[in-house]
Structure formats: structure tokens, C-alpha cells
Image (spheres, rainbow, N blue to C red):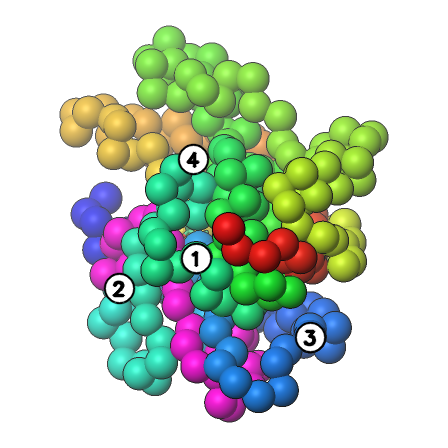
Amino acid sequence: MGSTSHAMKYSKFTCSFEKTRNTYKEWSKLFNSPKNGPFAIMDIGCGSGQVLMEVLEPMFPENYSELVGIDIDPTMIEYCKNLKLDSRISFEQMDIATKKLPDKFKNRFNLLCSFFCLMYVTDLRRALRNSRDMLKLNGELLYLFLHRINPVWECYKDLSRQEEWKPYTQEFADFIPRYSGEDRELELQADFTESGLEIIKYEFQSDYSICTTRRNILNLFETMNSLYHRIPEDKKQNFRLDYVISLSNYVGVDFLKEESLEEEIEMFFPTVVVHARNTQTAK
Ligand SMILES: C[S@@+](CC[C@H](N)C(=O)[O-])C[C@H]1O[C@@H](n2cnc3c(N)ncnc32)[C@H](O)[C@@H]1O
């Protein structure tokens, strides 16, 4: 897939963000935002900026000082940079689990938000330590991400069992989705507290669903397939096909039947919502 078309395709993923909006609104009542002074926000894994624009930006106090969207995928950032937005909004390519957090982001933000990104981060603890370092003292974060399932990585695990795809998917061979065991509460608490964050509230939700066409769901999962760049050009088409077959089996929906792609389906995404704060002063 061409690079910008990847982001274009994702930007066409339309669904109602009602549930996301309600969750952010409800949980934001607990935010301890500064009454005066600058209010700086970052959206992590902003994708094509839909949640940033439709949910986050309208929710913030009008006098917020800046809103920075970051994403690991340069095509998403390129796409976002072309959107005509408020001059306080900017975008930057960055891996939230980077080993070298840019100095300019340290101790800068009052609030970090992230919607459906962290399940794609292998080193979650490093991502959380970076989050802590980007927050001001008593700055807060609100992260929503999948737990118990991760369809994209489950497909990679499945593909890692096929000789042809093993070389490209090996690190997923033993993949177990985050917070899928009996000790999920302890696991989550350890991830956040050992990264230097104080949890204010968290909730495992199983009623998070998206109602949209099969085509939309397929597009969503195709744009989240971040391994294409590893696959040799002449194998890309077969890889795509096997990925879609694997996805169909995992989700239990046939995405190969072109004639049924316009049918609406409801898909459940078990989500964990975490509200935490940084209680450590910057080093
Ligand atoms: C499902 S999309 C969600 C996008 C956006 N939050 C929205 O709702 O429109 C997940 C995004 O996370 C990004 N992502 C994945 N791993 C990341 C990482 N390590 N650091 C930053 N962004 C990442 C992907 O490139 C993708 O754009």
C-alpha cells in the first residue's frame, strides 16, 4: 500500500465516536486541570486525527495552550499536517516507547490522552515511563486501549505458524494479549505504578462496540497492519490475502465475500480505561 494512501484509508474509517466521547467526557470530570496558566495536551497514536478533532479538541477549555498529536506512522503525521486546524495544534512523528525521548517534550504536558494505540506498543512500560516524563508534576493521563484481545497481533501469531510468513512475524509467535489472565488487575497496577505513575481510577469495560459496515472494519484492520514494509514486493499481495483470511477466522466474519462487505456489523472491543497522574518531580 502506498504510504499516504495508508493514512487516507484510515481517515475514511468512519464510525460514531459517541461512546469514546461519552467516556472521555465522563472521566474528564475527574481531571484536575489548572484554573489559570497554560494547559498543554498530547494525543498519543493520533492516527489521522479523528478522535483528536472530533472528541478531544472540542472538550478542552477554550484557552488551552497547545495540542500535540504524535504517531509512529509518518504517513499519518503527513496526513494530519495537511489538515487546516487551529494554530495551537501540531503533529509530530514519534514512537511513544522511544528510547530517546526528545528533551523538548519532557515535563511539558498537563494531560496526555490516547485512544486505541497502546495495545500496539511492545514495551508498554517504556511508553508509560516516557508518559510520566512528559507530564508536569501532577499532570494526568487518560488512556483507552484494548485488553484481552488484539486481533491484529493474533493474526500475526497465526501467520507466524506458516512457513512463508514466519521470517516476518516471528516475534508474535508467543503473543498473549495484555491483561487477559486472572491477575489482570495486578498486571495493570504493576505496569503503571512501576513506571512511576499513580493510578486514580481504572475500569475494564467489555461493552465497547463499534457498529459499522464489514468493509469499514476490514479497512480499519488493514491500515493497522504495520508489517507490510517488511514483506518483499512480490509477496505483498499474498500476505494481504492470508492476513484477511486469518482475520476472518479470528473475528468470525467473512471479509473475503465482496458482496457482503456493505452489511453492518457490531464488533466488540474490550477496552481498559486508565486515569493516572505523575506525582514525581522532573529530574
Ligand atoms: C487504531 S489507531 C487509533 C488512531 C486514533 N487514536 C483515532 O482514534 O483516530 C492506532 C494508531 O496508533 C499508532 N501507533 C501504534 N504504535 C505506536 C507507537 N508505538 N507510538 C505512537 N503511535 C503508535 C498507529 O500508527 C495508529 O495510527
Q: State the CA–CA distance, disc 2 to disc 1.
A: 25 Å
Determine the residue positioned at 28% across, 75% down.
83
Label 1: how many Cα within 10 Å (few below 14, some 14–19, many 20+): some
Q: Residue placed at 32% from the left, 65% from the top?
A: 91
Element assignment for label 2? helix
> Looking at the rendering, in which quadrant would you find the N terminus?
top left
Q: Is residue 207 left or right of residue 65?
A: right
| Three-letter code, disc 4 | Val
Structural distance between the alpha carbons of marks 3 and 1: 20 Å
**Quadrant of residue 186 in the image?**
top right
> In the rendered view, would you say 38 is above or below 18?
below
Which residue is at 64% across, 65% downward? 138
Residue type, mark 2 in image: Tyr
Q: Amino acid at mark 1?
A: Lys
Q: Is mark 4 within 8 Å of ligand 1?
A: no
Mark-to-mark CA distance, 4 and 2: 25 Å
Q: Is residue 114 at all visible to an observer of this figure?
A: no
228 versus 167 height, above or below: below
How far, Cα to Cα, is label 2 from label 3? Answer: 32 Å
Q: Tell me where residue 106 appears, x and y as whole percent.
A: 43, 57
Q: Assign a secondary structure to mark 4.
A: helix
Report the magenta residues as a range. Answer: 54-78
Residue topped by disc 2 = 79
Q: Is residue 258 left or right of residue 124?
A: left
- Label 4, on which residue? 244
Which of the 4 quarters of the picture holds residue 76?
bottom left
